[in-house]
Amino acid sequence: MMGDSLPRKLSLSVLSAYALPGLPLAVATLPVYVFIPTLYAQEFGIGLAVIGTILFATRLFDAFSDPVIGFLSDHTNSRFGRRKPWVVLSMPLMVLSIYKLFVPPDTVDDTYLAIWSVVLTLSWTGILLPYSAWAAELSSDYQERTRLTSAREAMVLIGTMIAAALPTLLIAWGYPSLRTHAFGIALFVVAVLPVAVLICAKVVPDLKRGAQNSLGLREGLRVLVENSAFRRLLISYLINATANGLPATLFILFVSYRLDMPNSYGPLLFAYFLSGFAGIPIWYQVSKRISKHRTWCLAMVIAVASFVWTPFIVGPGDYYVFLTITIVSGLAVGADLVLPPSVQADVVDMDTLESGQQRTGLYFALWGMATKLALGLAAGLAFPLLQAAGFDAEAAKKGVENTESSLFALAMIYAFLPVIFKSIAIGLMWNFPLSRTDHAEVQAKLLQRKSEA
């Protein structure tokens, strides 16, 4: 495997440089689903059902591009490497699309939202898929991969915390407008992403092309889907990511209307992601003692146990009750970010052993599809359900109040629906067929094959 050309333990400089782009890339994930729906609903009057449909359709459309980019990334063989050129060349388009989405003109419609959502998700794919596959190829060690994804996701959480903290700072400085908050987030990406990507490209090695993928795109996808361990992991990840996407999508609305504290969403978001950041080293240490998949299941159990009470005990003004739930569930999300991609890299080793081919990019393409589909499903489920329940996202602007039943529907979609999804994911992953011992056997066979070649 390509990672065997490097020391099993990566240097701190390589680890840090690789993780750095995660800081601005964070804005293209949850912050988009936290800020964009509320921004376009409250400031421009676009209906919640329309926004949900646009975001779901965008992710569904873009899902078809993921395998293509993953396949092409696997087959790229430039003098700069095969992952690095994709990351560098996709960066300017992502900078432009973030600015257009977060800093729209004074008059926009649903077509504007749809166009720039598509451009953002395509450019994000061009960066994120090669970037993720790159990590799987930097080390073949079971635990070092968790260290690598931990560093990357720690940067992602720091970036997300910056996005969450900006509104609080701007409110304190006398700028309460959601449009101003969105502008601050866009400015952060425009300033930091180019620098981070160039440092990563300069410092992190991108090894020569590994074993050739002789299968075509369609046949390669068929083989991947027939991999039972990968299929099980992917379905579990999709279900759990949808569970995480629902509260992310509805967070500002929940805090504004159910908690009735609209100016508190910044500190609460910051507390959630700070807890996730604090949880990463905890779950990393736990994963040293038990298998990664069991550690992930344990984290999901804690998230379910904390979140299940939210619709029934959180009402207007219950700030500290909700803060406690936010902190506990935030600790659990650290495992969601770090462990599944690490397990995914181990599953790629199984495929390499069985097929003799290196298809890391194609594997992470399907992973990217699941990520986008999950966020699209969250928006596609949440907003039509809310509208059907009679919830009005512009109630505050109109000077009217939402009904108790619509607010309870908001709470149930925000918290109880994710609990159901996470419970299913736990059941699927508990007996996952790839433990530390199993992976060590796979690695031993790969090394033996390499020595015999």
Image (cartoon, grey):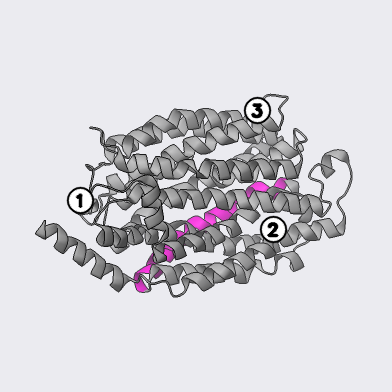
Q: Secondary structure at mark 2?
A: helix
Main SS of the magenta segment?
helix
Q: Is residue 220 left or right of residue 366?
A: left
Query: In this figure, what is the number of numbered marks?
Result: 3
> Label 1: which residue?
6
Q: Is residue 290 magenta?
A: no
Disc with the residue nearer the chain's start (1 vs 3):
1
Q: Is residue 115 above or below residue 428?
A: above
Which residue is tagged 3? 104
Check residue 23 in the rendering and tell me which mark sits there, or answer none: none
Nearer-the-camera pick, 211 or 372:
211
Residue at 44% from the left image edge and 62% from the top image edge: 231
In the rendered image, residue 146, in percent from the top left (x then y), is placed at 36, 59
Q: Residue at x 56, y 35 (%)?
A: 118
* Range of residues picked out in magenta: 263-289
Image position, residue 87 (x, y; %): 38, 36
User: In the image, what residue type sits under mark 1?
Assistant: Leu
| x 44%, y 75%: residue | 431
SS state under label 3: loop
Residue 340 vs residue 172, the one in the foreground: 340
Q: Residues within 10 Å of mark 3 (few under 14, many from 20)?
A: some
Image mark for residue 414: 2
